[in-house]
């Protein structure tokens, strides 16, 4: 494995992604053969944000491989409640664990964590930015249910602005030839510009619609997402967006017979319960595929070379530049060195990928 951390699936080559899928399927076929693959290893799950499936999937994956789990699922039960910085938490926990999965409400937090942790970092979701291991769950599901990862028409519906699972999936599936995207959302919740830039740079065709019904007949995959209440500034804004897109039997009847319906869960009201019994609905199986994907990821990362920490100083050319994304980790953890990449007349924050003018 080339990268010592998994912040974004861009850290991996396409071959490495396919190798993880292959290993996940081998584990699924013969789990007993891998029961001691991570014996003696310790996973730390640092969840600064609520989670059910992701945290339990990580924990179950490590325990099924013979390893152990430490960590917290509520930062108020840790020294974070006393004001401990992300740097100090990760420096300490990185000395206790062999690998760390972190979920945090601020964008760029996983990148920041990787700067200070002696143990490899897995991004388990950083704000509305990315969620690479959910994408691993998604593509293991697609590979098994569709038999391929290319030449697919993929519809993504719901909260495409704050939906980190959507962002990660588009970034990854843009790397496979012939895929095209149908982006179904209200105008207020369309995908961020940096995700459109990814599709444009990859030469991926995409269309933007405001009607789920209009899109159904052409889709090979439908990826439903909930409207994420926790990402909105106020309840009034959330109330205007919720309930706009609902997959029900009437719309489902317009879909292809081999359509596959995915959802990162939890669901709120965007998929009617009667859809659950349709053989095209694969969101519950998706959670199981995700466990095998994380098992394969642990084995791959823990068999790689040891991580070597770089030293970062806040004395570069951008030391006085402030990221304009108010949800960027740099606004909370103010000691973090300013890190930007230049793209023409724009600067792109290396933590959250937000663009700002020079």
Image (cartoon, rainbow, N blue to C red):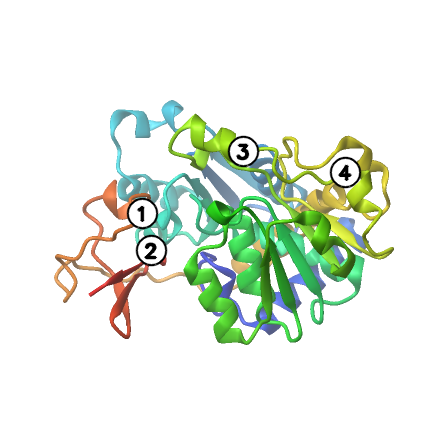
Seen at 51% across and 43% down, the residue is 42
Q: Residues within 10 Å of mark 1 (few under 14, many from 20)?
A: many
Residue 351 badge: 2
Counting from the top left corner in percent of width and height, residue 60 is at 64, 39
In percent of width and height, residue 315 lies at 12, 61
319 lies left or right of 191: left
Give the class, few, some or many, for how many residues have Cα within 10 Å of label 4's Cα (few <14, many ≥20): some
- The residue tagged 4 is 248
Circles 1, 2 touching at the beta carbon (< 8 Å) = yes
Left or right position of 154 against 277? left
Label 1 SS:
loop
Q: Which residue in the protein does label 3 denote?
A: 51
Locate residue 192 relative to residue 220 in the image: left or right.
left
Instruction: Please state the horizontal and vertical placement of residue 133, each as a whole percent of the image.
Output: 56, 52
Tell us which disc is closer to us: 3 or 4.
4
**Quadrant position of residue 341:** bottom left
Gap between marks 3 and 4 measured at Cα: 26 Å
Residue at 72% in and 40% down:
247
Mark 4 or 1 closer to N-term?
A: 4
Helix, strand or loop at label 2? It is loop
Q: CA distance from mark 4 to mark 1?
A: 36 Å
Q: Quadrant of residue 269?
A: top right
Determine whether label 2 and label 3 are within 8 Å by CB.
no
């Amino acid at each position: 494995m080339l990268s010592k951390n998994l912040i974004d699936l861009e850290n991996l080559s396409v071959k490495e992604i396919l190798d993880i899928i292959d290993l996940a399927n081998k584990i699924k076929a013969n789990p007993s053969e891998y029961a001691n693959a991570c014996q003696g290893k310790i996973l730390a799950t640092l969840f600064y944000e609520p989670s059910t499936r992701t945290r339990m999937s990580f924990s179950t994956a490590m325990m099924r491989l013979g390893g152990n789990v430490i960590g917290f699922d509520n930062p108020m039960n840790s020294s974070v409640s006393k004001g401990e910085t992300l740097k100090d938490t990760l420096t300490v926990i990185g000395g206790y664990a062999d690998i760390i999965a972190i979920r945090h409400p601020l964008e760029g937090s996983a990148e920041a964590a990787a700067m200070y942790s002696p143990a490899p970092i897995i991004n388990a979701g950083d704000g509305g930015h990315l969620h690479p291991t959910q994408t691993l769950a998604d593509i293991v599901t697609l590979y098994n249910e569709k038999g391929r990862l290319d030449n697919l028409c993929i519809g993504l519906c719901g909260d495409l602005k704050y939906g980190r699972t959507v962002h990660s999936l588009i970034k990854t599936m843009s790397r496979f030839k012939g895929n095209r995207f149908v982006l179904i959302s209200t105008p207020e919740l369309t995908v961020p510009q940096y995700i459109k830039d990814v599709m444009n740079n990859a030469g991926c065709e995409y269309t933007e619609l405001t009607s789920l019904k209009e899109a159904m007949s052409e889709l090979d995959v439908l990826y439903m997402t909930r409207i994420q209440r926790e990402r909105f500034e106020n309840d009034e804004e959330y109330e205007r967006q919720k309930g706009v897109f609902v997959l029900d039997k009437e719309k489902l009847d317009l879909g292809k017979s081999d359509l596959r319906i995915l959802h990162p869960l939890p669901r709120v009201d965007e998929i009617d319960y009667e859809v659950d019994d349709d053989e095209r609905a694969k969101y519950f199986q998706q959670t199981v595929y995700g466990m095998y994907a994380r098992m394969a990821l642990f084995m791959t990362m823990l068999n790689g070379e040891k991580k070597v920490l770089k030293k970062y100083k806040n004395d570069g050319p951008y030391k006085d530049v402030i990221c304009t994304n108010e949800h960027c980790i740099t606004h909370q953890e103010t000691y973090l060195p300013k890190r930007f990449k230049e793209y023409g007349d724009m600067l792109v924050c290396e933590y959250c990928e937000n663009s700002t003018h020079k």
